[in-house]
Image (spheres, grey):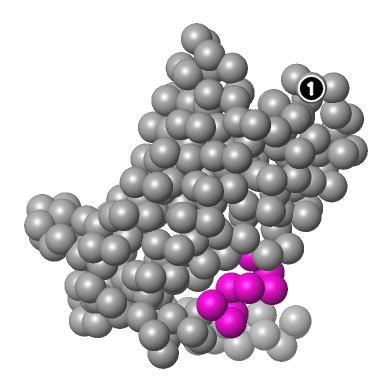
Amino acid sequence: KILLALLISIEPLKETITKNIQKIKFTEYFKNKQLLTLYLVQLGLTAWFATLYNFLPLYANDNGFSPKFIGFVLFAAVIPLIFLEFPIGKLADKNGFRKYISFGFMIIGLFTLTTFFADPLATIVIITIATIGAAFIEPLTEAYFFEEVRVKEQEESLYPIYKTSQEASSIIFPLIFSTILLFYNFKILFVVVAIFMFIFSFLALKLRR
């Protein structure tokens, strides 16, 4: 350390200013139909995670389940994301992205729709299993962005816009879902979530590949 200090005192480090300014091109992003569709798809995925991590624990707590039980449920929901993302990514590279993304939303929608007829414990189990669908979506959305935007300069200017989809969805859908709960119960909420998932499943088919 003393030697390093002496070297620095003899030859001070020169400060350099690095400029890497990229204009954020909102208009260019949303004029691209593929990127716009991808933005909407990412809204849907984040809406599902809001359901899983925000509203499912509220539902479980409302029905008398312990915090420990809720913790185990959320842990179990992550397992498909860990084990399925890599093989799904490999399959999508060979066969295309859109059908896997669409299928993922369809899985979530179908499972979530059945909770209308289920008791509380079954509802929690069903929604946990439905997260298998998210494993078809999560690894592919960002990969699709970089497939669509191959020029580095465009990536740097368009990627920040794409990432706002998560923040936007984290505001929009909790507001929608909370408003539903003001007037209806969780069963209706989960039906509405399922309808949204079907809509996003249809939108995913608009992707190019």
In this view of the protein, which residue sits in the foreground, 108 or 62?
108
Query: Which residue shows up at 75% across the image and 45% down it?
Result: 125
Query: Which residue shows up at 73% across the image and 63% down it?
Result: 79
At mark 1, the secondary structure is loop
Tell whether 60 sits left or right of 192.
Answer: right
| Residue beneath disc 1 | 63
Tell whether 79 sits left or right of 202.
Answer: right
* Residue 84 seen in this snapshot: yes
**Magenta span:** 81-88
The percent coordinates of residue 102 (x first, y second) are 40, 62
> Is residue 84 magenta-colored?
yes
Q: Residue lying at the far front in this picture: please name it.
A: 117
The percent coordinates of residue 9 (x first, y second) are 57, 80
Eyeballing the image, is 117 above or below 129? above
Q: Quadrant of the C terminus?
A: bottom left
* Residue 169 seen in this snapshot: no
Tell whether 16 sits left or right of 129.
Answer: left
Q: Quadrant of the N terminus?
A: bottom right
The percent coordinates of residue 181 (x first, y second) are 54, 17
Q: Residue lying at the far top in this picture: please name it.
A: 183
Eyeballing the image, is 148 above or below 118? below
